[in-house]
Amino acid sequence: MATYSRLPGSVALITLQNPPVNALSAAVRQGIVDTVQRALKDPKVTSVVICGQNGKFCGGADIREFAGPMLGPPLVPMIHAIEAVDKPVAAAIEGVALGGGLELALGCHYRIAHSKALLGLPEVTLGLLPGAGGTQRLPRLIGLTAALDLITTGRHISAAEALKLGIVDQVTDSNAVDQAVEFVRSVAGRS
Ligand SMILES: CCCCCCCC/C=C\C/C=C/C(=O)SCCNC(=O)CCNC(=O)[C@H](O)C(C)(C)COP(=O)(O)OP(=O)(O)OC[C@H]1O[C@@H](n2cnc3c(N)ncnc32)[C@H](O)[C@@H]1OP(=O)(O)O
């Protein structure tokens, strides 16, 4: 699931909740769809932060659901809908942003990472390609050569490397959610 709360300063905080790594189960995807719609419709909300509970942004597809039928909202339109929100949306990346988790973050307008976070597209290690926009959004963001390296090796990179490559906008040693909230407040209302 995903919870919704409104913070002072008109920021909606969406928190992914699916222990242990807040993977994108059907319930989490449904929770994201519902809470993003709520943030979009709430006139008091001017910006949005997406984070994961317990210091883990998102470990990607929920591997526990691989054996069963595909249920719940598909990932691609869900990420498109986030990208299309006309209020600034930031991903607060703590712990991991892997696979579909990184693709979710790439659909946000900004990414703020904790210095100890790990990012990557490990789909290739499962015999898959990133299928939720990663093969388009990552090359647009960091160029084809660097994106192909990450997509074809599946390696995990540090927040420092992600900053150098241009995947994240800021890295912090303190609380990434607080930093992301401060960041979106500073850009709210800008086109
Ligand atoms: C056919 C139906 C499919 C439906 C899916 C549709 C929605 C999404 C569609 C597709 C696009 C997305 C594709 C992907 O995202 S592929 C990538 C998936 N993610 C991964 O491959 C990450 C795998 N995990 C890891 O690399 C590591 O576990 C780690 C870096 C996240 C954490 O490492 P570490 O700290 O060493 O801990 P553990 O490895 O011991 O893991 C802890 C705990 O967490 C569980 N876990 C890890 N990843 C996932 C996951 N993706 N889903 C569910 N659970 C996960 C792991 O099993 C351990 O659990 P425990 O043994 O019970 O403690």
Image (cartoon, rainbow, N blue to C red):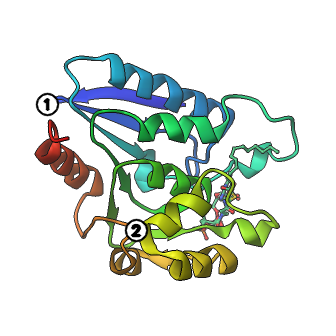
Q: Which mark is residue 163?
A: none
Q: Nearer the viewer, residue 164 or 180?
A: 164
Is residue 139 something one can see in this rendering?
yes
Horizontal and vertical percent position of residue 145? 55, 82
Q: Which residue is mark 2?
A: 167
Marks 1 and 2 sit apart, C-alpha to C-alpha, by: 28 Å
135 lies left or right of 90: right
Of residue 48 and residue 83, the one placed in the foreground of this image is 83
Of badges 1 and 2, the one in the foreground is 2
Q: State the image quarter where residue 128 is shown.
A: bottom right
- Residue at screen point 34% across, 49% down: 109
User: Badge 2: how crowded within 10 Å, few (<14), some, or many (20+)?
Assistant: many
Residue 155: horizontal and vertical position, in percent? 61, 79
> Is residue 17 visible from the viewing direction of this image?
no
Mark 2 belongs to which amino acid?
Ile
Q: Are marks 1 and 2 in contact (CB under 8 Å)?
A: no
Is residue 152 depicted above or below 9 in this figure? Answer: below
Indicate which quadrant contains ligand 1. Answer: bottom right
In the image, taking residue 61 as reference, residue 38 lies left or right, namely left
The disc at residue 8 is 1
Amino acid type for the residue under numbered disc 1: Pro
Image point 52% across, 39% down: which residue? 80
